[in-house]
Image (tube, grey):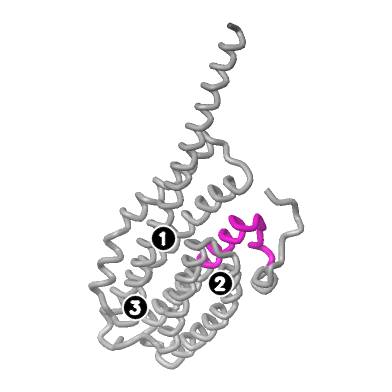
Amino acid sequence: MLQKEEAMHLSDWDAERVTLGRHFIRDLEGLWGGVLKLAAVVEDALDRSMRALCDGRTDLADEVRSEERDVDRLEVQIERECLKVLALHQPVASDLRRVASVLKVNGELERISNLARNIAKRVKKLAADPRMLTIPREMESLALEVLDQFRASLDALSRCDAALARTVIAGDGRVDRHFRIVLRELKDEIRRDPDRLNTWLRLINTTRNLERIADHATKIAEAVVYMKEGDIIRHLGAEVASRGGTDPRPQA
């Protein structure tokens, strides 16, 4: 009789483990779906922000600025779900890395969204300048390059592709060089036409925002490498990280 009762208890315990496992998988998939949804929303906002900047489209700038609450709501919701998964399921190994990576990417996406809105605000102010026809060609080229970097980081994220992520990391140095060229040109414009100082300063501020967006795209790529391979590479430098270098310190 005792053995029969013990067998029943063991059966109940196994069933509970199966149920908890299913809940964990469901919650983990929910996290993944949530961060990919946020990524799509931010990508759309950044795309419109870049088109607003390159084409002088103040209507697109208004759309970007109006979606702040939606992004903030999604970001907070994903963070809460991550904390719930950590508390309820106490994941380990690759599952823990995935939750930690979602938390990291979630924050980077929110910061990119903020920078996209900052650019949209500058577009509105630049449009008020009657002499401001188009942005400098090099700056437009930088904006498109940054957008490509961000999209590549999202591709690496959605595919869990560490090799592609390392390519994104390698491209950060190229963006930084392009950024310095644009910055130098805008400083030259200040010397040539100081009467339009406010306009040049707004363009410089926008250029810095573009460079920061590329930095956050790189951090998303670093999170993908960590999630897939378990390597923390954010302080190794773009050249070493892109070649597959790893941090010699103990990993989580």
Disc 2 marks which residue? 168
Left or right of 48? Residue 242 is right
Q: Residue at x 32, y 57 (%)?
A: 68
N-terminal of the pair, mark 2 or mark 1, is: 1
Q: Secondary structure at mark 2?
A: helix
Q: Earlier in the sequence, mark 3 or mark 2?
A: 3
Does 83 sit above or below residue 146? above
Going 35% across and 61% down the picture, which residue do you hit? Answer: 41
The residue under the point 28% across, 80% down is 56
- The label shown at residue 53 is 3
Direction left: furthest residue = 59
Work out which residue is located at the far right of the displayed protein and give it.
248
Majority secondary structure of magenta residues: helix
Residue nearest the observer in this picture, 197 or 166? 166
Using a 10 Å C-alpha cutoff, classify the residue at mark 2 as few (fewer than 14 neighbours), some (14 to 19) or many (20 or more): many
Numbered tag placed on residue 39 in the rendering = 1
Number of numbered discs visible in the structure rendering? 3
Which residue reaches farthest bottom? 192
Q: Nearer the viewer, residue 188 or 74?
A: 74
- Relative vertical location of residue 99 with respect to residue 150 in this rendering, above or below: above
Rendered location of residue 126, percent (x, y):
31, 78
- Magenta region, residue range: 216-236
Are discs 2 and 1 less than 8 Å apart at CB? no
- Residue at 26%, 66% (x, y): give it: 63
Viewer-side label of 3, 2:
2
Name the N-terminal-most of marks 1 and 3. 1
Tell me the kind of residue under disc 3: Leu
Determine whether, in the image, residue 68 is placed left or right of residue 156: left
Residue 187 rendering spot, x and y as whole percentages: 48, 85
